[in-house]
Image (spheres, rainbow, N blue to C red):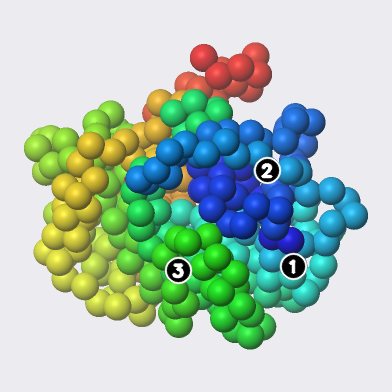
């Protein structure tokens, strides 16, 4: 049995594509008694009615996929892990960086793996899941004791039909994606525009070159693969163009009044820079501006419990 913690778009994509009967969602305090039911729209196919049961207390999963938002991961695992066997490998699917390392440090006795994915999925309404674009998923061991599970985990996830491969250096792979997210997500959230539209905006054009210089400096000092600022910008803009009509996950969070993952993207880079003695004023400025966007929602939510 594969347990999935986090019934958002990515969790639902894995639940809909892995063999039925082998997957269950981990219930969370806020979940209703009814198990998730939705219409799954494959990339090139007819919609499939999908119903995924909740994991019951007597079921003992032999694989745990964690598809929560980065900021929810530690608390969700704190509530869940007491009922999951210690031998069960955990695969983390969070965006950005920082939450993965926090989990492997918090539970050194557990086998922790991380995944980086370019699969595109979204939920236009609670009962629909659109697989918007086929991508690739890489999985690699984060903790030393997870290496021995890698082959089996990849083989089990491959039963979904999604493209999946083992990755020897998963931190480098996560970094590669973090750089793209740091150059697209905050700008699209602040400018409230689709990915492709940010390229023509004055605010983006003013800050993208100094941002890429900061990222390049941090990558050199932190031991990540060295990349020139121009190469970083080229990579960011290639993804912005190839996903030009998309709403980034951060812009979607701001629109929906949800907390964003900025602390795990530009916030993570800014903190890492500070620890390594690299100045990161642009990452700090972008982090602060994105936080300003969600602050009114968070304040109001804490007053009346309802997003506006
Ligand atoms: O976070 C996202 O939305 C995506 O990773 C990316 C690359 C910005 C494309 O929309």
Quadrant (top left/top right/bottom left/bottom right) for the N terminus: bottom right
Q: Which residue is mark 2?
A: 52
Q: CA distance from mark 1 to mark 2?
A: 17 Å
In the rendered image, residue 190, in percent from the top left (x then y), is placed at 29, 33
In the rendered image, residue 33, in percent from the top left (x then y), is placed at 79, 31
Viewer-proximal residue among 293 and 113: 113
Query: Which is nearer the N-term, disc 3 or disc 2?
Result: 2
Frontmost of labels 1 and 2 is: 2
Q: Is residue 244 left or right of residue 4?
A: left
Viewer-proximal residue among 73 and 212: 73
Tell me which corner region of the image, top left, top right, bottom left or bottom right, holds residue 305: top right
Instruction: Look at 80% across and 71% down and name the residue there.
Output: 86
Tell me which corner region of the image, top left, top right, bottom left or bottom right, holds residue 152: bottom right
Q: Which residue is mark 1?
A: 62
Q: CA distance from mark 3 to mark 2?
A: 22 Å
Viewer-proximal residue among 4 and 95: 4
Query: Which is nearer the N-term, disc 1 or disc 3?
Result: 1
Q: Is mark 1 within 8 Å of ligand 1?
A: no
Instruction: Look at 40% across and 33% down and name the residue there.
Output: 252
Q: Which residue is mark 3?
A: 164
Q: Is residue 302 left or right of residue 132?
A: right
Q: Is residue 243 left or right of residue 172?
A: left
Q: Circle 3 — which element?
A: strand
Residue 290 to residue 173: above or below: above
In the rendered image, residue 227, in percent from the top left (x then y), is placed at 21, 73
């Amino acid at each position: 049995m594969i347990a999935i913690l986090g019934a958002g778009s990515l969790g639902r994509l894995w639940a809909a594509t892995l063999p039925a009967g082998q997957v269950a969602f981990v219930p969370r305090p806020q979940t209703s008694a009814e198990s998730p039911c939705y219409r799954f729209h494959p990339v090139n196919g007819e919609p499939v009615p999908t119903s995924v049961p909740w994991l019951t207390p007597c079921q003992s999963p032999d694989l745990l996929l964690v598809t929560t938002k980065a900021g929810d991961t530690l608390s969700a695992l704190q509530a869940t892990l007491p009922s999951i066997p210690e031998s069960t490998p955990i695969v983390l699917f969070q965006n950005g960086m920082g939450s993965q390392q926090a989990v492997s440090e918090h539970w050194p006795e557990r086998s922790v793996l991380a995944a980086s994915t370019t699969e595109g999925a979204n939920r236009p309404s609670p009962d629909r899941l659109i697989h918007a674009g086929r991508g690739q998923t890489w999985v690699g061991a984060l903790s030393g004791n997870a290496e021995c599970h890698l082959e089996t985990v990849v083989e089990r996830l491959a039963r979904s039909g999604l493209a999946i491969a083992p990755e020897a250096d998963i931190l480098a792979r996560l970094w590669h994606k973090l750089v793209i997210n740091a150059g697209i997500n905050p700008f699209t959230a602040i400018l409230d525009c689709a990915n492709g539209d940010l390229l023509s905006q004055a605010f983006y054009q003013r800050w993208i070159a100094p941002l890429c210089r900061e990222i390049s400096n941090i990558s050199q000092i932190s031991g990540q693969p060295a990349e020139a600022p121009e190469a970083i910008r080229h990579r960011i803009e290639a993804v912005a163009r190839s996903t030009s009509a998309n709403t980034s996950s951060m812009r979607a969070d701001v629109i929906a009044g949800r907390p964003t993952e900025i602390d795990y993207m530009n916030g993570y880079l800014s903190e890492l820079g500070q620890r390594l003695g690299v100045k990161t004023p642009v990452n700090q400025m972008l982090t602060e501006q994105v936080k300003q966007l969600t602050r009114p929602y968070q304040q109001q939510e804490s007053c009346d419990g309802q997003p506006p």
